[in-house]
Image: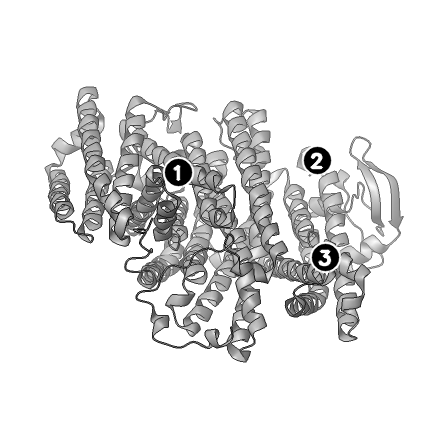
Amino acid sequence: MDPTALLLSRLQFAFTISFHIIFPAFTIGLAAWLTVLEAMHQYSGRPVYRTLFEFWLKIFGVAFGMGVVSGVVMAFQFGTNWSVLSKMSGPIQGPLLAYETFTAFMLEAGFFGILIFGRPRVPPWFYLFSTAMVALGTTLSAFWIMVNNSWMQVPTGYVLQNGQFVPDDWAQIIFNRVVWVRFPHMLLASYLTGAFCVAATGAWYVLRRTYRPEAHVMLRMGLALAAVLLPVQLFIGHLVGDYVHDYQPAKFAAIEARWHDEQPASEVLIAIPDSSTESNRYAISIPVLGSIIASMSLSSKEVGLSSFAPQDRPPVAIPFFAFRIMVGCGFVMLGLAWLGTWLGLKHRLERSRLLLWGIFLSFPLPWIAILTGWYTAEVGRQPWTVYGVLRTADAATPFLTASAATASLILFVAVYAFIFSFGTYYIYRLLRAGPAGLGGKSLDVPVPNRPMSLADKMPTIVEAGE
Amino acid sequence: MVTFWVALLAISILIYLLLDGFDLGVGMLCGLAHSEAKRETMLHTVAPVWDGNETWLVVAGVIMWGAFPLAYATVMSAFYIPVIVMLLGLILRGVAFEFRGKALRSRWIWDVSFVAGSFAASFMQGAMVGALVEGLQFSNGDYAGGTFGWLTVFSALCGIGLCFGYSLLGACWLVRKCDGLVRDAARRQIPPLAIGVLMFLIVVFAYALAEHLPILQRWTDRPYLFLFPLVGAGAAAVLATSVLRHDDYWPFHMVALIFAAAFGTLALSFWPYMIPFVLTIDEAAAPHASLAFMFWGAGLFVFPLMLLYVAVGYRVFRGKSAPAVDHY
């Protein structure tokens, strides 16, 4: 295998998947929020919920479309660039992805059309049902992806036969403890992304003194959800760390920038890891805390990177910094959410302009946390694709040439940059225009005419709310 | 178990051909529509369903990976360039649905990317099928044809042929879903497109004869294969009369039948190979544990459910979908 083609394939995978995750992270949370809004509107009849629903549905549509098209790429890229991996792990990863497609993609795709175009054509209960099905689909999709990735992190329930991973215990593959901490971690991260985007939009409108009723609902709901979920997320994050400690000691050592075995271990808060000297420069560390975090003990021995052969060590700088950025984002969000909710309860939130600016500008934080969290997990898994069994260098398509890989990477970067800049611009414009922008001619997608619509025959509570 | 998954793979590919076929076809025909209103109307006939249609490509892809990992790995890596260009085409046309409606001055960009993306995806799909029919270069079961091994005169012809085929299907879809000017324009496009498809079939067949493509031997070995072209010819006859009678309903179904017949011919000529004369279905199949795991959940229960969602989706958006544009 050509080393340049290998590096380019890795870059291409990292680029396309980083791009892709931005959208599901957003739409998983947003779909759940849309379901809540639609249910609250049908239950209470308050027009503000319907206005918010229609507003966020447009943003959901753009983000969902970009998530779908960038996701299709992922299903094929395993075969194009990683043919050895797909040959070997196909019997396990293939069926898991098949379950994802069968249970999730089809559910989303089937009901997404109804969500966007179908309101005049179906009764309200069916519309709510469709919204819930799209939300369920996005969640199931995340579940199967986490099962799949967790198997690559901690391969289990298989035997190696004729150069293939042959499953011999599906229950162990799916109900593995690792899945059940990593899936909630990702799901909560998505809900937090949705919550912060909604709260940030609310804060922006309050700062601009427009859309008061909608902004009020968005701020309160977004912040309250984040305030409740963030402590849970930090706790689950700690459990994720536990699995890394137990199953992937080299990754754990890289995250902690721990070069040598220590007993009791200190915790490096911040430093510049230097792999040539196998030490940290400018380190600030706290004695014993490393053992407490890793093993809940004051005296445990923690493994350092030098205990692993050099060819089995992951790179250190990326997992080390990415992990710290993720945790940092988490604590900043926690502070904003708690402070905001507390001031909201005291009815002082709308006057605290400094905090509102903070909330408004915080919208990238959940994405940064998700991306850096994934970099920690995936770069920390190196040099393995399937941890401990299949090296990344051995997993790539053997006959892929550097020129083909260069061409495809350039094409991906060009097309993604193009659609990303327009996509974010359109989302920004929708957000800036706000809920009232719905009536605007230029922004409005024409509604199909409704000659045979079911809705014509039944009066809907929806219309009563308008 | 293997037979079940081959059947499901074949069904999924056929559903993909028919569903994304018409919506890629509408995409290409959009390039011929001169007014904004026409394009808008055409787009609207596929906007609620394109996402589901495209998902069948993923369904076929993951069935292939899960049930026939060897075939998946071989085909995808051998078709590196065409797969990636196809995906990028699908991306560009897919986002156009959402972006077009949000754009103001930049709407033309998304019209262009919708048409160009549809062409790129259709051409590459046709070229890949063509390359499989003609035969890729292998040594000891490993692909050895190089980056452009898939690109030949024959595969390029097949790419163009599929563009014609999809456009024909798209035109019939528009006849079925639209009224007024858009329908009339689409109806006028059917004869030239159908002739294009016919010409393509003749040229491809002549080429195959001249080059002694090994797949032709299948036809002498298996005379029952001639049944499919007969069905296709019958469907073509009904298509011709229904277009002449200005019928809106039948053309789409007849072209779909022609597609099904063509697909059946190819699939049965390949049998029992998955990649002709290199990899058989049984060699490519995943171990029983994988096939059974997929069968007892996804295959037996979820697959019928998926068909149900598709049916519900098309039922909700049934009938003539878009407003007439006579007043333009």
Mark 2: which amino acid?
Ala
* Contact (Cβ within 8 Å) of mark 1 with mark 2: no
* Mark 1, residue position: B115
**Residue A314 placed where, x, y %?**
69, 39
Q: Residue at x 60, y 51 (%)?
A: A429
Mark 1: which amino acid?
Val
Q: Residue at x 33, y 62 (%)?
A: B308
| First reached walking from the N terminus: tag 3 or tag 2 | 2
- Which one is in front in this view, the residue at disc 1 or the one at disc 2? 1
Q: In which quarter of the view is residue B35 placed?
A: top left
**Residue B120 placed where, x, y %?**
39, 34
* Mark 3, residue position: A360
Question: Regarding mark 2 in the picture, which secondary structure is present there?
Answer: loop
How far apart marks 1 and 3 lie (CA) works out to 39 Å
How far apart marks 1 and 2 lie (CA) works out to 54 Å
Mark drawn on residue A393: none
**Residue A459 placed where, x, y %?**
40, 77
Left-right relation of B28 to A104: left
Of residues A126 and B204, the one drawn nearer to the viewer in this rendering: A126
Q: Residue at x 48, y 66 (%)?
A: A131
How far apart marks 3 and 2 lie (CA) works out to 47 Å
Query: Visible in this render: residue B94?
Result: yes
Of residues B106 and B64, the one drawn nearer to the viewer in this rendering: B106
Residues beneath discs 1 and 2 located on the same chain: no
**Residue A384 placed where, x, y %?**
60, 40
* Mark 2, residue position: A309
Please tell me how crowded label 2 is: few (under 14), some (14-19), or many (20+) other residues with Cα within 10 Å: few
